[in-house]
Image (tube, rainbow, N blue to C red):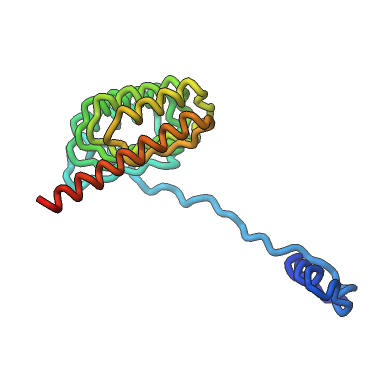
Amino acid sequence: MHNLITNTQLCNIVGSSNGVDQEHFSNVVKGEKIVPVFDEPPNPTNVEESLKRIKENDARLVEVNLNNIKNIPVPTLKGFAKALETNTHVKYFSLAATRSNDPVAIAFADMLRVNKHLKSLNIESNFITGAGILALIDALRDNETLAELKIDNQRQQLGTAVELEIAKMLEENTNILKFGYQFTQQGPRTRAADAITKNNDLVRKRRVEGDHQ
């Protein structure tokens, strides 16, 4: 009767300093057990209730997570952006993988121009093109409170021109401390990294100066 060994064990045998172990030479190789990868559990967020609480400016609601909810209608997503325009308590808003498109991105860009309380916006893994991303980037010129923006992994590549505009915005903006996007071009990537480092250095400098006062 043959004994079963795994690929890993075979590699250990063959790779040993003594060469192939004769005792195991006739063994049968079996594959390593594959660990199954399960889908993420459904997002339990109540979409309509969350929108209602944002509109009511509920002080207890500081974070909204709509990630991976695929069936939110575009008008509802735009409704969240509109409600955030006057909300003063939500600090973190995430709508990754919600099938959001350019009209949704433009609605959130309009929100960023007037909202003075949101700290983090995650709009990754959607269907937003360069036009929608540029709208968001341009809106940051009028926003002094957002510290984190995540836009990576859109269905369509943004292209060099958009990446250059992103880098330019980050160089002009002193508030963005975290920017979620994998640049494809070395030039914009380096400029963006330098800008983020500069902004974080400014925050540390202000903190040190505050401690000394």
State the image quarter where residue 120 is shown. top left
State the image quarter where residue 23 is shown. bottom right
Asked if residue 47 can be seen in this view, the reply is no
Q: Which residue lies at the image location 39% right of the left edge and 22% below the top edge?
A: 134
Q: Which residue lies at the image location 20% right of the left edge and 44% below the top edge?
A: 206
State the image quarter where residue 151 is shown. top left
Looking at the rendered structure, the number of numbered marks drawn on it comes to 0
The relative height of residue 116 versus residue 40 in the rendered view (above or below) is above
Q: Is residue 129 left or right of residue 88?
A: right
**The furthest residue to the left:** 213
Asked if residue 209 can be seen in this view, the reply is yes
Residue 143 or residue 32, whichever sits in front:
143
Q: Is residue 71 left or right of residue 174?
A: right
Residue 152: horizontal and vertical position, in percent? 46, 35
Residue 17: horizontal and vertical position, in percent? 80, 73
Q: Which residue lies at the image location 69% right of the left edge and 64% below the top edge?
A: 33
Residue 175 or residue 50, whichever sits in front:
175
Q: Which residue lies at the image location 53% right of the left edge and 27% below the top edge?
A: 157
For the N terminus, the image quarter is bottom right
Residue 100 or residue 10, whichever sits in front:
10
Residue 67: horizontal and vertical position, in percent? 41, 42
Residue 115: horizontal and vertical position, in percent? 22, 31
Q: Is residue 170 left or right of residue 181?
A: left
